[in-house]
Amino acid sequence: MSNNKFWTAINNLKSSAECVVEGTITTEEDYNKIKWVTGVENNEAVLSDTCPHTELTWSKVKAEMDKL
């Protein structure tokens, strides 16, 4: 299974959001393992376990994925 729906949902909800994903995102547990890019320091991404975008909760992303 691919993350095509996940990436499309993220792009539809917040096209500027950046994150690092390992594996396939199909559950809230998977979603909670995403590393979100919150900035750049010394040419390296600063990652966070907490999504900085209010538009991108699991509920909203899952609803968008279900539409696709």
Image (cartoon, rainbow, N blue to C red):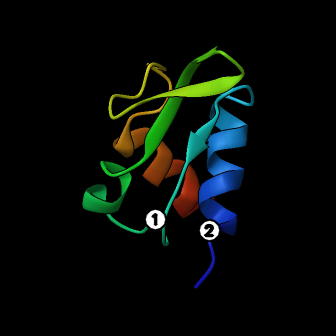
Front position in the image: 29 or 66: 29
Residue denoted by label 2: 3
Front position in the image: 39 or 26: 39
Judge the density around disc 2: few (<14), some (14-19), many (≥20) Cα neighbours within 10 Å: some
Q: Residue at x 34, y 61 (%)?
A: 30
- Mark number for residue 63? none
Q: Secondary structure at mark 1?
A: loop
Q: Residue at x 44, y 53 (%)?
A: 62
Judge from the rendering whether residue 52 lies leftward or rightward of residue 11; answer left or right: left
Given the image, on which type of amino acid does mark 2 rest? Asn
Question: In what quadrant of the picture does the N terminus appear?
Answer: bottom right
In this view, 33 is above or below 55: below
- Residue 28 drawn at (x, y percent): 29, 56
Sequence-wise, the earlier of marks 1 and 2 is 2
Q: Secondary structure at mark 2?
A: loop
Quadrant in the picture for residue 40: top right
Quadrant in the picture for residue 19: top right
Q: Residue furthest left?
A: 29
Given the image, on which type of amino acid does mark 1 rest? Ile
Residue denoted by label 1: 25
Disc tally is: 2
Q: Are marks 1 and 2 in contact (CB under 8 Å)?
A: yes
Judge the density around disc 1: few (<14), some (14-19), many (≥20) Cα neighbours within 10 Å: many
Question: In what quadrant of the picture does the C terminus appear?
Answer: bottom right
- Residue 14 drawn at (x, y percent): 66, 28
- Residue 42 drawn at (x, y percent): 66, 15
Q: Residue at x 49, y 33 (%)?
A: 36
Q: Residue at x 33, y 28 (%)?
A: 50
In this view, 56 is above or below 58: above
- Residue 11 drawn at (x, y percent): 72, 40
Front position in the image: 57 or 67: 57
